Image (spheres, rainbow, N blue to C red):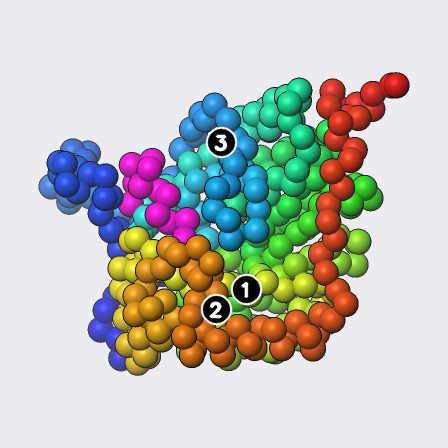
Amino acid sequence: MNSNPTIKGRGAQLNTSNRFFELSHEMRDEFLEYCAIEGEEVDTNKTQYLEVFPKTIVNKVSSPDVGMLYSMNMYQGCEHGCVYCYARNTHVFWGYSPGLDFERRILVKKDAPKLLEAHLKKKNWQAYPIVMSGNTDCYQPAEKKLEITRKCLEVFLRYKHPVGIITKNALILRDLDVLKELAKDNLIGVNVSITSLSEDTRRILEPRTATIKKRLETVRILSENGIPVNVMIAPIIPSINSHEILPLAKTVSEQGAVSIGHTIVRLNGAIGKIFTDWINKSMPDRADKVLRQIENCHGGSLNDSRYGTRMRGEGEIAKQINDLVKLAKLKYFKNKAMPKLNRTLHEQYKDGQLKLF
């Protein structure tokens, strides 16, 4: 039996320090200290939504191996709580921990639709697919109430601009009407993340995401409505979901996905500490084995920032995983591929309506 208590409904089990503060000064919160002294509950495990006001919303992606050139994020932090999430490290730039803070302090950009519209109307902007959720999920729980993602999709539709989506939440089906309109002009591509077919694995690895059944249903419904779907089997974690590559590929192909993608888990920055703490609490019987195998994929380290190898890894275990993915593509996705999105219409709709020539 695991003697370490876990925080139910969360991925990270601790708040790691913020590297920008730990060397300069100690951060103290007088209010929380006062609560503790008075005997009040300091941490209720509730999620806070904090509005922020960025000047721009579209970001140019400089990394050469992530498969996108432009991204936008309506939310910073993500309540889904995926313990392996690479985006955790970005939360320190906002003054928060990449651990529990990343899941419980969600920064909200309500002005995103207006900022997006201003960007698309720029005279020197040439249409290129912008991916929503390059960092955190645009359909995380806050979206159900705030509808920022839906409003952004309506902007993309009005300006006939190509857009990609990455999500692991079935909430995307709420916006099926807008997605279908975008699909008529080949302006939309959806990437659904499915890391396992096991609910037990999903529940501890990605605690606040849609169930596997719901995600498979999402792939099917989107595909049936003419919306191309790529399934991201990512990340693949040795001895946790690496044995599921072929059955997962077969299942999502049967649901209508036209392609799959993958990455091998890497635990950069604070994520190494967060993941190590989590696996020792959640899977103590195999913790050492999993950590050693991840290190085997990245030159003996949990961390890997080398372009060209960081996503696919190296070594014997990584080769086995990559070979299985190649086999899965040949077996279940031969002569299939995500279509290139339409970049030709936007110039005619830069004012939000068809220009007359």
- Mark 3 lies on residue: 109
Position of residue 313 measured from the top left corner of the image (x, y, whole percent): 43, 67
Position of residue 337 measured from the top left corner of the image (x, y, whole percent): 72, 60
**Label 3 sits on what residue type?**
Lys
Label 2: element kind = strand
Label 1: element kind = strand
Residue 120 tag number: none
**Label 2 sits on what residue type?**
Ile
- Mark 2 lies on residue: 236
**Label 1 sits on what residue type?**
His
Left or right, 165 with reference to 301: right
Residue closer to the observer: 215 or 304 = 304
Label 3: element kind = loop
Residue drawn at point x = 79 percent, y = 53 percent: 226
Residue closer to the observer: 304 or 239 = 304
Real-space CA distance between mark 2 and mark 3, rounded to the nearest whole angstrom: 31 Å
Residue 346 on the magenta segment? no
Residue at the extreme right: 357
Real-space CA distance between mark 2 and mark 1, rounded to the nearest whole angstrom: 7 Å
Classify the position of the C terminus by image quarter: top right
Position of residue 217 measured from the top left corner of the image (x, y, whole percent): 68, 63
Residue closer to the observer: 143 or 259 = 259
- Which callout, 3 or 1, points to the residue nearer the camera? 1
Residue 92 on the magenta segment? yes
Q: Residues within 10 Å of mark 2 (few under 14, many from 20)?
A: many
Instruction: Examine the image and state in which quarter residue 149 appears.
Output: top right
Residue drawn at point x = 47 percent, y = 23 percent: 55
- Mark 1 lies on residue: 262
